[in-house]
Image (cartoon, rainbow, N blue to C red):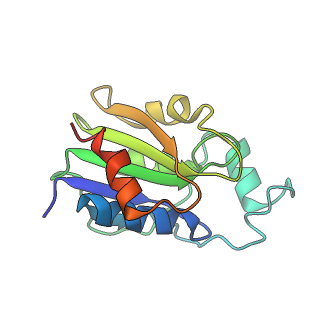
Amino acid sequence: MSDILVAYFSASGVTKKVAKNLSAAIDADIYEIKPEVPYTDADLNWMDKNSRSSIEMRDRNSRPNMIEDDFSTDKYNTIFIGFPIWWYIAPTIINTFLEKHDFSNKKIVLFATSGGSRFGRTIENIRPSVADSTVIVEGDILNSNPSVEELKAWAEKFLK
């Protein structure tokens, strides 16, 4: 059992691949943040202002439901959280995840996948969802399917 966790949300599978490789690279436990209702291609159509993801991202108070389970953050000190960038921030299901668990006195390292955006206002938007004692570190956008070796070297700087 590790005291490091890789938690991730992946709507299309891209972030999932990176998260699995990162978990293997640093010998971390892995946890998938699963929406109660999976996203369809139509839900993810950012060009449709009435698509599910567009509606959620316009409403900063949106908290999509997650599949409930007995997961706990208690044994983890460092938690890497991965997600695709939507509208220059993390999808609001990340706020749902953060608000359902206790991240007090833990270090969260963010990583993301993106078709062209950076982190934008991600930390600003998720900060209210965690305790003041939670350390949030903006990691990197990890596109182009980095190898296990590359991910190990990348993650090591956050594990010191």
Going 65% across and 70% down the picture, which residue do you hit? 39
Which of the pair 47/154 is nearer the observer? Answer: 154
Going 50% across and 32% down the picture, which residue do you hit? 123
Q: Position of residue 81 (x, y in %)?
A: 41, 50
Q: Position of residue 88 (x, y in %)?
A: 67, 40
Res 102 seen here: no
Give the residue at the far right of this rendering.
48
Going 24% across and 41% down the picture, which residue do you hit? 159
Give the residue at the far top of this rendering.
132
Which of the pair 30/113 is nearer the observer? Answer: 113
Image check: 12 left or right of 2?
right
Which of the pair 21/130 is nearer the observer? Answer: 21
Res 74 seen here: yes
Q: In which quarter of the image is residue 160?
A: top left
Q: In this view, does 13 lie above or below 149?
A: below
Q: Where is residue 53 in the image (x, y as percent from the top left)?
A: 71, 57
Going 40% across and 46% down the picture, which residue do you hit? 98
Q: In which quarter of the image is residue 149?
A: bottom left
Q: Quadrant of the N terminus?
A: bottom left
Image check: 53 left or right of 29?
right
Q: Is residue 85 above or below residue 147?
A: above
